[in-house]
Image: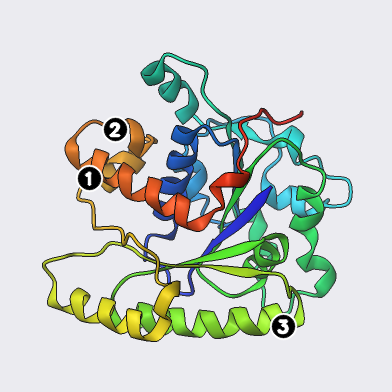
């Protein structure tokens, strides 16, 4: 099971959009996937079409990590039924560990080593998923550290703008320090440039700067700005099943990005054990 944290120091760069785009690509590819919504705003939970339920949210599961039943408290994404209608075939699993403001109690800078292992403890008792995507809050406080401790890889999201590029450089330094102290096996999946405008001279300049700064860590493809992305997310819909040419192109970008981020050879289609 590969566990990938999607992180950014700066808010507003489309971190959740990248998370849901990768989830959409995984669903289309038949990869059993769990999305853990660690952002207290819970935007990924909303975008994934999760309906209110009696399941325990991720914040309360973290509080009771020693006995918490993560597998028994995941909720199927609302996208699965849509995917089944489009494919007319049995689709793969896409489950969500629901986000909530309650998880914010752990988003503090002084989180101890024991608390950092709370999500890793919950995930250690989960079986059947080939991929776990963790949507982190836009900070380097406790929740991001909890996510990194539980992960195999970290994917960083940045816009080709001055402050976002500078923030990504700081995040890379913080990630290296965290790796040395807490997680020597943690890998950097790469950096994805999101919301790229090909007609912007500033974006062209910053992309060139990012290639110089980060080299091969800057992943291909970059993700262009999509005019109807807010509409897709507002409708709680998978981009792979949204009509129109622009959505079809975006789906292709996320298919390629998923292949860049994870080792597709290790993915297996199977249903999680409950």
Bin the neighbour count of mark 1 within 10 Å (Cα to Cα): few under 14, some 14-19, many 20 and up. few
* Marks 3 and 1 in Cβ contact (< 8 Å): no
Q: Position of residue 225 (x, y in %)?
A: 24, 57
Point 76% across, 49% down: residue: 123
> Which residue carries the number 1 mark?
228
* Marks 2 and 1 in Cβ contact (< 8 Å): yes
Which of marks 1 and 3 precedes in the sequence? 3
Point 19% across, 64% down: residue: 197
SS category of the residue bearing label 1: loop
Bin the neighbour count of mark 2 within 10 Å (Cα to Cα): few under 14, some 14-19, many 20 and up. some
> Which residue carries the number 3 mark?
180
> Vertical placement of 63 versus 153: above or below?
above
> Vertical placement of 249 versus 14: above or below?
above
- Marks 2 and 1, Cα distance to the nearest angstrom? 10 Å
Residue 197 visible in rendering: yes
Q: Position of residue 97 (x, y in %)?
A: 63, 43
Bin the neighbour count of mark 3 within 10 Å (Cα to Cα): few under 14, some 14-19, many 20 and up. few
- Marks 3 and 2, Cα distance to the nearest angstrom? 43 Å
Q: Which picture quadrant has residue 220?
A: bottom left
């Amino acid at each position: 099971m590969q566990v990938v944290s999607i992180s950014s120091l700066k808010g507003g760069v489309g971190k959740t959009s990248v998370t849901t785009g990768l989830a959409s690509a995984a669903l289309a590819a038949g990869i059993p996937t769990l999305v853990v919504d660690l952002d207290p705003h819970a935007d990924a939970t909303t975008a994934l079409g999760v309906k209110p339920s009696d399941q325990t949210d991720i914040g309360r599961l973290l509080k009771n990590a020693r006995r918490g039943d993560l597998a028994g408290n995941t909720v199927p994404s609302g996208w699965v039924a849509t995917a089944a209608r489009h494919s007319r075939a049995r689709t793969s699993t896409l489950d969500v560990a629901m986000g909530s403001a309650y998880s914010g109690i752990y988003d503090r800078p002084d989180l101890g080593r024991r608390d950092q292992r709370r999500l890793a403890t919950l995930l250690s008792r989960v079986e059947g998923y080939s991929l776990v995507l963790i949507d982190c809050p836009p900070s380097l406080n406790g929740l991001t550290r909890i996510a990194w401790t539980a992960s195999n890889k970290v994917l960083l999201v940045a816009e080709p703008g001055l402050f976002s590029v500078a923030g990504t450089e700081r995040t890379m330094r913080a990630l290296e320090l965290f790796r040395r102290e807490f997680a020597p096996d943690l890998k950097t999946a790469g950096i994805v440039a999101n919301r790229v405008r090909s007609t912007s001279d500033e974006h062209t300049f910053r992309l060139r700067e990012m290639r110089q700064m980060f080299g091969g860590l800057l992943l291909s493809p970059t993700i262009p700005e999509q005019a109807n992305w807010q509409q897709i997310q507002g409708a709680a819909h998978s981009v792979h099943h949204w009509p129109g040419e622009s959505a079809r192109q975006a789906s292709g970008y996320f298919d390629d990005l998923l292949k860049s981020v994870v080792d597709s050879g290790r993915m297996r289609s199977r249903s999680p054990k409950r």
